[in-house]
Image (tube, grey):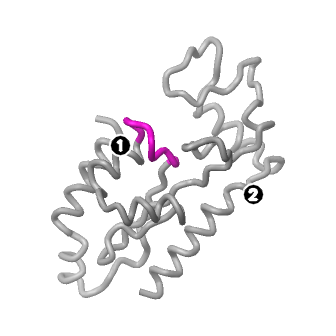
Amino acid sequence: MSFFQTFSNFAIIFINTNYYEYFLKTSGSKAHYPAIFVFDNELESKGKPLKKFFDNYAKDEEAKEKIKTQLYVHLLKSSNIYLVTNPILESSSKEAEIEHLFSKDVLETKIEGKPLSLSGDYDKSKYYGKVTFSKYIMNNYKSIDFSNFRIILDNIAKILKEYNES
């Protein structure tokens, strides 16, 4: 079972059963922090996690519009569950993975002579994948521009403020 299937099953059970309200009533206090799920901004393509999530769980069109416009949404007003996605930087694109927030130079970095493949299914003899890319980022973070991630971080800060004020 994939992570997404496991997460989707958890989310559906959690939301439909509303364990949050149950625990709120039995404990007498709300969760100390919000739970924030981060998805790639892939709301259009069938089979992508964010699209599946909204098709199978959050059929609320208002929440879908919020995720498109403000890039985060409080999924259940009575809970601590939020969803965040990354911005789409290319005006010609309808979707973007979080890796697209890196500069073209970083995305075009060759490792052992191989270019990056963002696909889950790629020829490992010709390309390197996301795991190798993440290790490259970790080892070179001091020289990498993360400014395009600011929107995500600002939205997480907004969520924390909003949740603490509720």
Element type where label 1 sits in the image: helix
Which contiguous range is marked in magenta?
Answer: 40-48
Residue labelled with disc 1:
4
Which element carries disc 2, helix, strand or loop? helix
Residue 157: image x %, image y %?
58, 73
Number of marks drawn: 2
Vertical comparison of 26 with 50: above or below: below
Disc marking residue 75: none
Residue 2: % across, % down: 33, 36
Residue at x-position 37% and y-position 66%: 62
Per the image, the residue denoted by label 2 is 147
Q: Nearer the viewer, residue 132 or 97?
A: 97
Q: Is residue 42 magenta?
A: yes
Q: Amino acid at mark 1?
A: Phe
Asked if marks 1 and 2 touch (Cβ < 8 Å), the reply is no
Reply above or below: 8 against 133. below
